[in-house]
Amino acid sequence: MRYASPTMSDARHILVAVAWPYASGPRHLGHLAGAYLPADIFARYHRTAGNRVLMVSGSDVHGTPITVRAEDEGVTPQEIVDRYHSQFLEHWRTIGISWDLYTTTGTENHAEVAQDVFLKLLENGYMEEKTTDQFFDEDAGRFLPDRYVEGTCPHCGYTDARGDQCDNCGRTLDPEDLIDPRSKLTGTTPQLRSTDHFFLKLSALQQPVADWLATRQGWRKHVINWAQSFVNDGLHDRAITRDLDWGIRVPLDNVGPEKRIYVWFEAVIGYLSAAKEWSKRVGAPEAWRLWWEDPEAETYYFVGKDNIPFHAVMWPAMLLGYGGLNLPTDVPANQYITFSGEQASTSRGVGKSISYYTDRMEPDALRYALASNLPEQNDTDLTEAELDRAINQELISTWGNLVNRVLNMTWKNFDARIPQPGRLTELDRNLLESIDAALVTTARQIEAIELRAGLRTMMDAAADVNVYLNATEPWKLAKKDLERTATVLHTALSAINGIKTGLYPYLPFSSEDIHHWLGQPGTVRDAGWIRTVVTPGSTLVKPEPMFRRSELIAPEDD
């Protein structure tokens, strides 16, 4: 049975574009569940199904959170970037995030692409220079970027809102919107001073963006509703330069030396610059066009809820103004992960770092616990007790124990080889047909980015195998009917082989272990999205327990 393994001529081009984290501090589980794990599940499925995936992202090295941290620590911004970019790379390796390229916005390639987009928008009439007021800290003697201004949010009253966004209600802001603004540098009240900046003429792009959003189908309701509401409220021209000494230079000769392209504008260009960088690295400089210029190609942006306006409105506006590049197929932004009712936030210290969990949990166990709790439609409050429960009562009890039980029975009764089955009964056929159907269903669910549902479908399939074993009782059959035992265990092993494929996007490490234990050639990805019947006579590898019990909450504290 095969659901989706196209030939190379049918293969779809799938760009998986994933949010760029600021290299300013540790990432927490909210980041992992919000964008990185969902993107990896989606990309792994499409690669296994035979599609041509390009998954890119990188560390955002020009954000003001980096310069704020550098000033707080008395080090250079580059030292902060180097520290956390290295940490991110280690996270992705440990957890198994399968990038085609994870880069940074600090490369010459990215600067060139960002400057090209700037100049093309200027040439096409979607940019203009204006004199504007910007907050100036007289004690520090400098203009303040948005994140250097803090104050009270005019929408929800949160007193620690930033000049670019309120972390409490998620609204995007301008520094002048804040009530009782204060400088993050000195704590004083900044004053507005005139300065010249370039503005993206979002007002001129409002109708094209609205028309495009009206064509979107299948988007999550909270994404499309927020995007359309944002546009309907009116798009205002937005500054895309700032007076800074850290960032990409404005590519014009008639501006001052301190003018830089502002981070919100150049960071989203990273998806395009990363595709171009990847093309150069693989020795095919024009390959990026397959994902960006072919109208049949598909682009999926995996971001958190707070990034919806930038990816569903502003970046499409930039692409429309630039011309000739594909707009998003979908922006499957997740809702928030909360911890004990509070939104996870690195800056506010809510939620433990990814490193805390990778030091204590196996990667597939962590992936499972998060995937089964992804905040796809609603905010999800995550506790360590829930992480323990998902791993111990679901992953180990339903799947890990099943695999070890069947492989050990086969190892013991058939000399470490896959047995030759006899004629299948209706019960045997029904099980294998149900596994085939589960693979089709999971494929459709992942295609629709219903990742939690896809995982549940495969775990339900594992539960079906347990029901089958309870009905056939091979541990009893082995004492009186070895031929029937061979058929039952071969059927169970074939079912496990199929479930392993369906779980591979979620549990890549343990799925590859099972593939190896069953004596299958190559890798899970090589086999395609298919339930292959295991080959009689193949040598089994003696299995080991796949997962250890999770004890984030000590038993005595339960």
Image (spheres, rainbow, N blue to C red):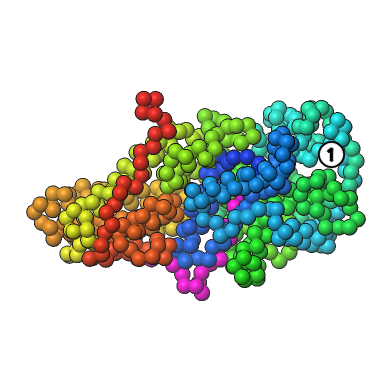
Quick one: label 1, few (<14), some, or many (20+) residues within 10 Å?
A: many
Q: Confirm whether residue 243 shows in the render.
A: yes
Q: What's the magenta region?
A: 1-19
Amino acid at circle 1? Phe
Residue pictured at 61% horizontal, 36% vertical: 346
| Total numbered circles | 1
* Coordinates of residue 170 in the picture (x, y in percent): 66, 38
Apparent side of residue 205 relative to residue 45 in the rendered image (left or right): right
Q: Is residue 258 magenta?
A: no
On the rendered structure, is 62 left or right of 101? right
Residue appearing at x 36%, y 28% in the figure: 555
Q: Which residue is most to the top? A: 556
Q: Look at 89% across and 57% down and name the residue there.
A: 253
Of residue 389 and residue 282, the one placed in the foreground of this image is: 282
Q: Position of residue 34 (x, y in %)?
A: 55, 44
Front-most of residues 399 and 109: 109
Residue 426 makes an appearance in the image: no
Q: Would you identify the image quadrant in which residue 323 lies?
A: bottom right
Vertical comparison of 327 with 64: above or below: below
Q: Quadrant of the C terminus?
A: top left
Residue 142, position as x, y percentages in the image:
85, 38
The structure residue drawn at horizontal position 8% and vertical position 54%, both measured from the top left corner, is 480
Judging from the image, what secondary structure is the residue with disc 1 in? strand
Give the farthest residue toward the left.
480
| Whether residue 501 is situated above or below residue 29 in the rendered picture | below
Question: In the image shown, does 55 or 513 lie closer to the viewer?
Answer: 513
Q: Is 80 positioned to the left or the right of 526 in the image?
A: right
Q: Quadrant of the N terminus?
A: bottom left
The residue to which callout 1 is attached is: 143
Reply yes or no: does residue 12 show up in magenta: yes
- Majority secondary structure of the magenta segment? loop
Residue 17 drawn at (x, y percent): 60, 55
